[in-house]
Amino acid sequence: MNRGIVGLIVIFTLFLATLIMDGQGDDTSAIKHFPIDKSLDFTLQQTDLKLLSQTGNDAFNVLWKETSEIEKKVYLRQDVSVLYVDGRLRGVLSEWKENIDNISQETVLPDEGSSHFQAITFHHGELHYPDDKIKSIHGMSKSELYVIDSPHSALESFQKPEDQNQQEWMKTLNHATAQQLSYHWKQLLKHFQIPASNYHFVPLTNLYRYQDEPIPSLTMGETDVVIGQLWEGLYKNYILDITSQLSEDKPVKSFVPLVLFDKEGTHLMVLFQDAHGQKQQLLQYYPSSSKR
């Protein structure tokens, strides 16, 4: 790796992550990955996007909702959901509660024009046992919504195309999003001098695939650990900063982060643009073979 970029890398591991934000205060709400509790499971993990109503000639409202439930009440529950529209950050839902089994969040967002909505949610639970043993449980869910606002037809939406017209719209919207993100990601790769051929690329919005399949070069058990660590780092180094800027009602120049999985199975990287438009890079090493 080029030595010139080492100082720009934020390294986060199982027990330590460097915070972008100062003055965070009580970190009870921070997502923390602990050894996975295999005795419990989620009974519900769900993210929903739904077109509600047309509010003007080109305007409409979209319902964004996420909910999850564990088999029993646990010490701490936290869910965080991130929404992108046409590849650009639109909002964050985040909530934590103590001694509870379920969390549900929703909001209604105004928008306009034909758009592609993508939301991904990380569901998390922290469990405390005698002798100061702490374990965690996590999962992911996602949702996509295509909204067609055409002068030649009534406003409509779909998650999966049901006819030729919707298929064409999906291709058009996907192409527009892909073009924008491709340009953005290429700038990040160039800025940090990343050898692209050494990595598998996965957008954050597609990270859900590793809910049921292993990361290349890893087992499913190792994948669960790495995903938990990854979201811990994303929350502390990306989502908290983004959320603080959204709450101040400022424009946020952030797009879907790109996750890079090393083909040799030793580490991953996350490239993104923060709320201030600055290029950022996170590096996460996989657990060593002795700790797996």
Image (cartoon, grey):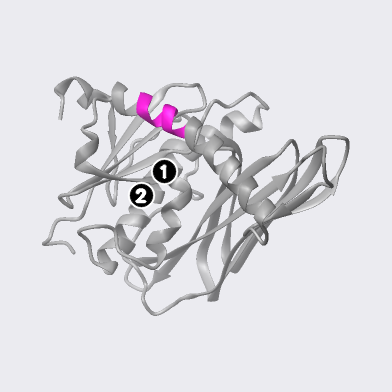
| Element carrying mark 2 | helix
- Indicate the quadrant where residue 5 lies: top left
In this rendering, position of residue 210 left or right of residue 110: left
User: Where does residue 244 sit, x and y in percent of width and height?
Assistant: 57, 32
Rendered residue at 18%/52% (across/down): 265
How crowded is the residue under tag 2: few (<14 C-alpha within 10 Å), some, or many (20+)? many
Q: Which residue is mark 2?
A: 230
Which three-letter amino acid code belongs to the residue tagged 2? Leu
> Majority secondary structure of the magenta segment?
helix
Confirm or deny contact between disc 2 and disc 1 (CB under 8 A): yes
Residue 182 colored in magenta in the image:
yes
**What residue occupies the far left of the structure in this picture?**
290
Q: Any magenta on residue 268? A: no
**How many badges with numbers are in the image?**
2
Residue 277 visible from this viewpoint: yes
Per the image, the residue denoted by label 1 is 234
Residue 93 visible here? no
> What residue appears at the point 39 percent right and 31 percent down from the top-left corner?
185
Disc 1 crowd rating (10 Å Cα; few below 14, some 14-19, many 20+) is some
Q: Position of residue 250 (x, y in %)?
A: 64, 24
Quadrant where the C terminus is found in the figure? bottom left
Quadrant location, the N terminus: top left
- Vertical placement of 279 versus 124: above or below? above
Q: Residue at x 20, y 59 (%)?
A: 217
> Judging from the image, what secondary structure is the residue with disc 1 in?
helix
Q: Name the spot of residue 76 as percent of width and height, x first.
A: 51, 62
Report the magenta residues as a range: 181-187
Q: Is residue 52 left or right of residue 285?
A: right
